[in-house]
Amino acid sequence: MSAAESLEAHVRDLAVCERCPSMHRPAIVTKPVQSKVLLVGQAPGSREPVLGKPFAWTAGKTLFRWMGEATGLDEESFRQRVYIASVCRCYPGRNPKGGDRVPNETERASCRPWLEAEMRLLQPDLVIPIGKLAISQFMPVGKLVDVVGVTYSNVEWQGFKFDLLPLPHPSGASTWHRMEPGKLLTIQALDLLSAHPAILGLK
C-alpha cells in the first residue's frame, strides 16, 4: 500500500471511530493530505459535525485569517496543503457551566493513537498546536505567554522529531489573542510561521 493509500485508509477508519461513548459522533476528519505540516486543534465544536470538517465555524474564520497572513493561502488552498488534526476528534458536548466541555484525560488517551498514526504516516517537519490543550500534548505549558511567539526546534515526541510552533486558540470566547501581550505574541508567532521552510514549501 502506498503512503497516500495508507493515509486514505487511516482517514476512513478514523471517521467511524467509536472509542469514546461520552463523545458525540461522528469523528471529524480532514482531507487525507500528504503534508509536512500538521496542525493540531483541541476538539470539534458543535457546528463541525454539521459542516463535516475541522475549524468550520467562528474559530475557523480567525484561524484561516491567521493562516492567510502567514502563508498567503486562502482557506481552501490551506486545507488542500495542510493536514488538520485535533487532540480529540469528536465533539465533547456542552459544559454545564457554559461553553464546550474539555475532553478528559481518558478521552485524550483514547484518541492519541490516531495522532501517533498521523505522525508516523506524515513524518511532519512542522507541527502547529492550536490552544493550550493541544500545546500540552507536546510540551509542558503553564501559561500561553510562556510558549507563544517561539519556534521550538527538534522537539521529540513518541519517537518523532519536528519543529513545534504553538498558537493560541482562535475561539471567539477567548480574549487572549486580542489583548496584550497575547496580541503581540500571536503576531510574532505568525511571523515565525511565515518564514518556516515547511510553510514556504506549501506555496
Image (cartoon, rainbow, N blue to C red):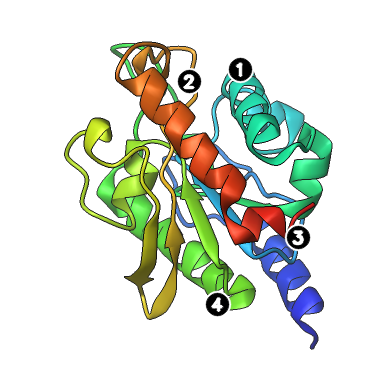
Q: Measure how far apart labels 1 and 3 are at the Cα level.
A: 23 Å
Query: Circle 3 — which element?
Result: loop
Query: Circle 1 — which element?
Result: helix
Question: What residue is drawn where x is 25% and y is 31%?
Answer: 145
Q: Do the residues labelled 1 and 2 touch (CB within 8 Å)?
A: yes
Q: Where in the figure is residue 173, as x and y percent of width and height? A: 42, 12
Q: Measure how far apart labels 1 and 4 are at the Cα level.
A: 31 Å
Q: Where in the figure is residue 68, as x and y percent of width and height? A: 70, 32
In this orientation, which residue lies closer to the viewer: 75 or 26?
Answer: 75
Residue 80 visible in rendering:
yes
Amino acid type indicated by mark 3: Val
Amino acid type indicated by mark 1: Thr
Query: Circle 2 — which element?
Result: loop
Q: Earlier in the sequence, mark 4 or mark 3?
A: 3
Residue lying at the far bottom of the rendered structure: 1
Q: Earlier in the sequence, mark 1 or mark 2?
A: 1
Q: Do the residues labelled 2 and 4 touch (CB within 8 Å)?
A: no
Q: Residue 33 carries which label?
A: 3
Residue lying at the far left of the rendered structure: 142
Query: Circle 4 — which element?
Result: helix
Amino acid type indicated by mark 4: Arg
Q: Mark 2 points at which residue?
A: 171
Mark 2, other Cα within 10 Å: few <14 / some 14–19 / many ≥20: some
Q: Which of marks 3 and 2 is nearer the N terminus?
A: 3
Q: Are marks 1 and 3 in contact (CB under 8 Å)?
A: no
Q: Mark 1 points at which residue?
A: 58
Q: Mark 4 points at which residue?
A: 120
Task: Identify the image quadrant of residue 110.
Answer: bottom left
Q: Relative to 121, is 130 on the left or the right?
A: left
Question: What residue is drawn where x is 42% and y is 12%?
Answer: 178
